[in-house]
Amino acid sequence: MTAPDAGLRVHVVDRDRDVDVTIAVGPGECVALVGPNGAGKSTVVETVAGLLRAPDSTVALDGRDLARLPAHRRHVGLVAQRADLFPHLSVVDNVAFGPRAAGTGGREARHRAVAALTTVGVAGLVDRAPGALSGGQAQRVAIARVLATDPAVLLLDEPTSALDVDARAAVREALATARAGRPTVLVTHDPLEAVALADRVVVLQDGRVVEQGPVDAVLRHPRTPFAASFSGLALVRGTATAGGIALDGGGALASTTGTVPPGRPVVAALHPTAVRVTRDGPGPARTVTSLEPRDGLVRVRTADLVADVTVATAAGLGLAPGVTVRLSVAPDEVAVYEPGA
């Protein structure tokens, strides 16, 4: 049975930045911290790591207070966006640096370094200079450097954001190994990273927690605009009907996903690519407010609904701000649920 205070318990209060965030991370659990820029994610990470001294904050690990300890005594490992390896040391010496700094003898420190490099799949790089590494290789060495210190808590601050697509898969695999068995906080803007590594998602906005839950629940049924955007979904509000949702902006959408008693306030989550745009077809009428390029498509925005269409479709329909269109969605593509459910 897990003790009630096991794992990481954090209450970050920074009055200057208007941040007041409480999160709990169980033993062996990974929590993804997401939110727009300026939401408070970095403040949380820096406070846990001991890089930001916030007198009103509490940081506890298995019931032990860490908040008053300096960073080097917290036993917290941090993997940031960039590897920042020591350029004058070989790969193995970079990884051995942490154990050596903690007082471990040279032979044992090297043994730990090689073991850590083996764990993340780059044991063949031991004698390389950091300047000879690719971005993905350098980041895996940075992960090994953290693993060699056997941290009690792991902080991952956008660990793949500086990498190209081809390198990210290998680094995620190394991160999955690194996070096993220890409380981990992952800051990310990548939903795939959250799915691959996290057990839960905590959404921050304006320095507060606005939504949290299991990864699948948050991504499938987001309750806030940012969570919907993070999931790649669009969120629209209205009132439940017997067959779907009556939209606040007028019109209705049918749904075969979710059953809510008619009359209750609800949200509908749908993917913009599932929305069909016509000039005179079925669906609610809306006025186009803007057109934006989006991953090879054109995002059509209205006051409340959005759709992603091909460039050919946008040109063929003569889409432009001010044009009235009809928007329809197949009922099985619309998930209707109560905001707090």
Image: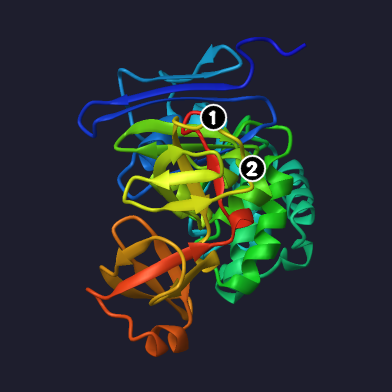
Looking at numbered disc 1 in the image, what kind of residue is underneath it?
A: Pro
Who comes first in sequence, dot 1 or dot 2? 2
Question: Where, by quadrant of the figure, is residue 20 drawn?
Answer: top left
Quadrant location of the C terminus in the rendered image: top right
Q: Is residue 146 left or right of residue 36?
A: right
For mark 2, give the secondary structure: helix
- The amino acid sitting under disc 2 is Asp
Q: Is residue 224 visible?
A: no
The answer to whether residue 211 is visible is yes
Answer left or right for 128 relative to 240: right
Residue 261 numbered tag: 1
Label 1, label 2: how far apart the Cα atoms are? 24 Å
Q: Residue at x 74, y 55 (%)?
A: 120
**Disc 1 and disc 2 in contact, CB within 8 angstroms:** no
Is residue 107 or residue 181 the one in the foreground? 181
- Residue at x-position 32% and y-position 75%: 291
- Residue 31, position as x, y percentages in the image: 57, 36
Q: Nearer the viewer, residue 121 or 207?
A: 207
- Quarter of the view holding residue 139: bottom right
**Residue under the image location 51 percent in, 49 percent down:** 269
Q: Residue 73: x percent and y percent?
A: 51, 27
Q: Badge 1, how many Cα within 10 Å: few under 14, some, many 20+?
A: some
Label 2 environment density (alpha carbons within 10 Å; few <14, some 14–19, many ≥20) = some
Answer with the quarter of the image where residue 164 lies.
bottom right
Where residue 250 appears, as percent x and y from the top left, is 33, 51
Give the residue at mark 2: 216
